[in-house]
Amino acid sequence: MRLNCTVNGEARQADDVWAGESLLYVLRERLGLPGSKNACEQGECGSCTVYMDGTPVCACLVAAGQAEGRDVVTVEGIADGPVQQAFLAAGAVQCGFCTPGLVVAVHDLLARDSAPTDPEIREALAGNLCRCTGYEKILDAVRLAVQR
Amino acid sequence: MTTVEAGVAGGVGTSPKRPDGGLKVRGEFAFSSDLWADDMLWGATLRSPHPHARIRGIDITAAVALPGVYAVLTHEDVPGAKRYGLEIVDQPVLAMGEVKYQGEPVAVVAADHPETARRAAARIVVDYEVLPAVTEASLGVLLRHVPIRTGDPDATADVVVTGEYQVGMQDQAFLGPESGLAVPAEDGGVDLYIATQWLHVDQKQVADCLGLPAEKVRLTLAGVGGAFGAREDLSMQVHASLLALHTGRPVKMVYGREESFFGHVHRHPATMWYEHGATRDGKLVYVKAKIVLDGGAYASSSTAVAANAATLGIGPYEVPNVVMDASVYYTNNPPCGAMRGFGAVQACFAYESQMDKLASALGLDPVEVRLRNAMTTGSRMPTGQIVEGPAPVADLLIRVRSAPPAPEGSGDLREMPGGVSNTTHGEGVVRGIGYGIGIKNVAFSEGFDDYATARVRLELIGGEPAVLVHTAAAEVGQGLVTVQAQIARTELGVERVTVATADTSVGSAGSSSASRQTYMTGGAVRAACQAVRAALLARVGGARLDGGKVLSDSGAVIADLASVIGDGPIEETVEWRHRPTYPLDPVTGQGNAHVQYAFAAHRATVDVDVELGLVRVVEIVTAQDVGKAVNPLAVEGQIHGGTAQGLGLALMEEIQMVDGIVRNPSFTDYLIPTILDMPPMKVDVLEMADPHSPYGLRGVGEPPTISSTPAVVAAVRAATGKALTRVPVRPEHIVG
């Protein structure tokens, strides 16, 4: 099938999409946007988090056809700003495989709440697994991004 | 603090930003699963559904007939060695007549779409004759037995405590799945872009299996999404290369999460029997221990894991009389091998549980009984090896004990055990505190020729001095690329340092494991920089470098660095070794097997809902001696992350096996700590220099994983009064 959607502000088209493909696969393998990550493809780890019509979703759980006509924003489409810089400065990046999903999730959190408390940060990021950091410096990064 | 030449920002002891960090936060960093080539095919693997079966036949007809399929390969298509392995060459590239664990690769497929490849694999008909599976280590074939004997084997003591302990099968659960791209080359070889921990050991094994000379199998490190030991063994390296050579097309393979659980080795499950004898004032007289490890179907690094369990198996304590037997057995469970902590983790849970039991029997505080037995510089290991360099075991314990107590709960539901599940508002919740301390060897042991290679080039770029550092060392997330650049800045006084992509065009760096890379590749980079510096100074008869100037003995400026380089770039390649280690005596286990010891201590505070068996870790305090914090921010990151993996083993992480079948190969059912499970962590970093290591540093990555598990379990015991002899602790262990 042919898929039409807006990705990072541009109208994009993908041809020969097999109906069983996920939005994540289309982004990574057909549209040249591998920033959204394929850590579990089971909706458990949050590493493929993208915005769809303004709502963060796991792109691995969205069938490609469900994205027809929708507005998708990936980590590549989020302007390099305080969230990304705070992750770098705080040491919240190690292997970096969880980072794109976390950047989108934190971007969304701070858009909803400019001064989240620690319990609120933890609740908001509970769907994003990280295996390297123990989350301590991810919390530091969010606090730092809030200050900025 | 070690004095080093400085003069530029971003050197040793500072925390400059990661050079790969900008790419990573923008989603632009190329991980091994992100690679793409024109005309590439996708590989898929058919795996055994049985833990043990004879293969009577394989029929690939239906798979080959599927449109879009380009190759279906079995063991008959492996042109070189049919088996590979890190220590013992025993693991088939593709099963030959028999499968020995569930998930063992049987055939591989290349197709033009990953789903086509998977469907083709599913059409392969394998005629299995199911055989009985050995799933208990004690019933398996012995792979290695490591005995250690010191002192009087018949020693007796006033106070004796015994216990049996078990550790479940933990998974490394890195987030970036096994993946890579194999590209056939015009010379008949293959270029492999891969996430691994050790490029050269992969290169050798892949070349052997392909029947090619090593120079025709060129490996380049692709972005690595975590490792933790799970990338020491081969996964899809040979498979993708076979498919690429067979089809003449680039082949990409990417495991899904379920396949990843079958695609790498795990932490050895262990059953351990310990007997500690002590005087009435709490001095250890003897330890007798038997450790049984389940090695699974193939050897991987089991033999070295068993040696670690044995040699580190009584902990960081002085014990005059030791009878230790650690054994690892083949079974039909998944192969087990390297995971952060490597044999020291299992033993630490047992010996620290025993120290708590001893404290209880003596009516002593658990930290006090540890202090009375703490090893120090000059202590003798049960192997006879004298502990050289700082061994601040007592200091670490005192530091974690002296930290202010964890804050009382705020009453926020989200801070209760069970959290937003709303299972308690405080009723039935009991707080507990526990301690743990552990010991780990750094780098490779038992006489292994352990070295790292670094090539350093000093040149002018745009008229400015610049350094290029090239090693084959695997950046797996720990920050090795940052550290290599820091060392070059410090040694050469040049701020502009580029670390080249790791590949096999430079000599081996050894593995990114055993907490060894900052020590080993860091040591090699330092030595190569020193060689470059010596050559540079020799050009003008200088004595040292400072602030971009070449100085004489008296400190007078001889020349600008740039003008000296102007005569031509200087490049040096150095192979660097740590002090030699020696084998263990096969009967007595005596020998100077390890080059460096590292120590960490933890205090855990938990709240337990004793009615439901739910645990919330409230706070973790940890202290670790790192010798020299080459990059303080990265050191903290290692300690945080290692502590989290230890907490996971304590409370939730286990690959659950039933009759050789994995029951939970997903992140839905194999739980790793989320941000809700992790408490605030207070980290106390000591820097007590090791006189033998570069900058005095000590390996950092593994020690925090080792002692956090027993500390968390001890805290749960303190809250519940339960014996809790098995990790991970489950709710039914608490309420049962």
Image (cartoon, rainbow, N blue to C red):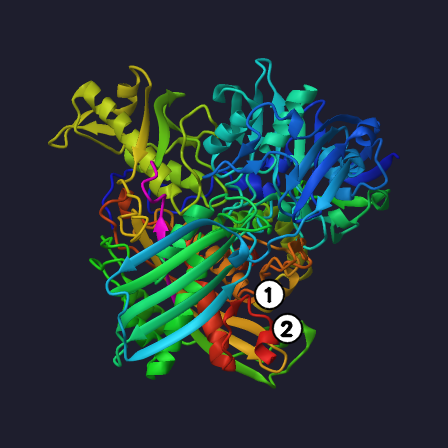
Q: What stretch is highlighted in magenta?
A: B435-449
Residue sitting at the far bottom: B427
Q: Which amino acid does label 2 sit on?
A: Gly
**Quarter occupied by the C terminus of chain B:** bottom right
Asked if residue A51 is among those painted magenta in the image, a careful observer would answer no
Q: Counting residues from the N terminus, which is met first, the one under dot 1 or under dot 2?
A: 2
Q: What residue type is labelled 1?
A: Leu
| Residue B49 pos. (x, y %) | 71, 47
Decide if residue B493 is in sight here: no
Q: In which quarter of the image is residue B565?
A: top left
Residue at image location 24% in from the left, 56% down from the top: B390
**Residue matched to label 2:** B419
Q: In which quarter of the image is residue B139?
A: bottom right
Tag 1–tag 2 contact (CB < 8 Å): yes
| Residue B66 pos. (x, y %) | 83, 29
Q: Mark 1 lies on which chain?
A: B
Up the image or down, B167 lies above or below B608; here it is above
Q: Residue B676 carries which label?
A: 1
Residue at image location 53% in from the left, 53% down from the top: B140
- In the shown orientation, is residue B640 left or right of residue B10? right
| Residue B203 pos. (x, y %) | 50, 28
SS for callout 2: helix
Same chain for labels 1 and 2? Say yes or no.
yes
- In the shown orientation, is residue B570 left or right of residue B217? left
Up the image or down, A145 lies above or below B507; here it is below
Decide if residue A14 is in sight here: yes
Q: Which chain carries label 2?
A: B
Graded by Cα atoms within 10 Å as few (under 14), some (14 to 19) or many (20 or more), the crowding at tag 2 reads some
Up the image or down, B547 lies above or below B591; here it is above
